[in-house]
Amino acid sequence: MVPYFCTVGKGLEKFCVLELSEKVNDVQIHESITGKVFFSSKEPPGVLLALKVVERLFILVFNGEQFLCQVPSSRALRKLKSLVESDPINWDICLNHWRAYQELSEVNVSSGVEAQFSSQFVSASCAKKLCISYVESCDDSHSITNFPARFRVSCKCSGIVRKTFHQQLLARIIGRSLVKTRAWTVDLRNPDVEVYVHASDQYLTLGLPVTKRPLSDRPFLKHIKVRSTLCHAVLMAVGGLSSGSVVLDPMCGAATLLVEGAVSFPSVTFIGLDICPAQLKRAKENVNTATVGEHVHLLLGSAVCLPLKDGCVSHVICDLPFGNKFGSVNDVKRLLPDVLLSLNRVICSGGKLAFLISNTLTNFLHNSVHNLNTFLFPNQGANCVTRSYLVCRWKALERHSVKLGELPANICVFEKESVKHD
Ligand SMILES: C[S@@+](CC[C@H](N)C(=O)[O-])C[C@H]1O[C@@H](n2cnc3c(N)ncnc32)[C@H](O)[C@@H]1O
């Protein structure tokens, strides 16, 4: 088993754990803390590069209780030095695991796959095949022992450690120890290997990032409006996307959500609508650079009057406007009830909706859904409703707290249930 950890956006830890359990065989999840998930896996390198909710993936070098603030600082620094120079860290083993990822990039370059191997272009099963063939053709001469590593230490301190130690001081101590014991050369600009250190209130964690670029990079996007890891979490939250699903984003903006969906679920049809032609132009560019035009259809129009047939959509995903860029909170409050009514018409019974919405507007969304239910089904079976799409109720399924940049937000999931008349 190779020990790993990955960094994730705040609130996305549970999506990361779910993704690991679904996509990685024999994975053992050890711990999930704010912003990080620790796990082990036997999978060949590459399979993990297909993870979509992860920011960065690391070979775990060390994770232990943070001792820096528990003893006088001179003793703490001596302890840190001896941790790096001797047991329990086995740098050779860690570097061999790390090296396998560097070899993987080389194999992919030579096999004609794009130079920046990116799991976004290669399905997990393809990645697995490539990795297996690499592992089979690899012999022991690839040992890291003589690797002439140029390295740098990137140290991040948070909480009380940040107040006690300067992160550059810790980076320097770790760096000097590595120069002394491993005879590596410091290269701050273009290192072969980066040693990542995070000292939080809880843990001291050391790791080697397996790729230079974060896994969360989506090189196929020209305009990024929402972090793709968060978009992926919205797609996971709405759930049940499979061949035949029709997904609508009624306020699609630059289509970040739709493109993430189309890349990850190629058998699904995606429809994006926006009232603003300039946004749709950006959406079109993103769809084109990601080459998903076959699966993503863009329409100009208003979400309050959707130009779609009754019940033709199985899933709705929507990053509701917030802030002053796309309208004030009051504008959104005025718009939302009509948008919900319009969505109610186009989404089929049993259909699901996931809204990414700021904290400020979350209660308003829930109240609007409550009001919609009262309108749709006023008196437990009132006979004033005539059209079939009106005989239904929206049920709140889940609410996940996330961060939109620094803004606290939620992913709220609903299901449209049909309600039987007596
Ligand atoms: C927060 S942005 C969406 C960002 C989008 N999720 C993305 O991936 O780029 C909100 C979008 O809602 C659009 N919008 C605002 N009012 C609308 C309406 N009545 N109908 C359709 N779109 C609307 C805005 O033009 C804007 O592009």
Image: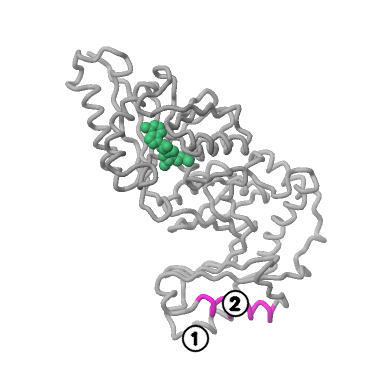
- Vertical arrangement, residue 306 with respect to residue 87, above or below: above
In the image, what residue occupies the spot 64% across and 46% down? 47
Image check: 353 left or right of 375? right
Q: Residues within 10 Å of mark 1 (few under 14, many from 20)?
A: few
Q: Are marks 2 and 1 in contact (CB under 8 Å)?
A: no
x, y percent for residue 17: 49, 48
In magenta stretch: residue 317: no
- Vertical arrangement, residue 331 with respect to residue 46, above or below: above
> On the image, which quarter does residue 94 sit in?
bottom right
x, y percent for residue 374: 21, 26
Element type at mark 1? helix
Q: Which mark is residue 75?
A: 1
Q: Quadrant of ligand 1?
A: top left
x, y percent for residue 74: 49, 87
Q: What kind of residue is marked 2?
A: Ile
- Check disc 2 and report the residue beneath it: 174
- Vertical arrangement, residue 108 with respect to residue 153, above or below: above
* Residue 353 seen: no
Element type at mark 2? helix
> On the image, which quarter does residue 349 sit in?
top left
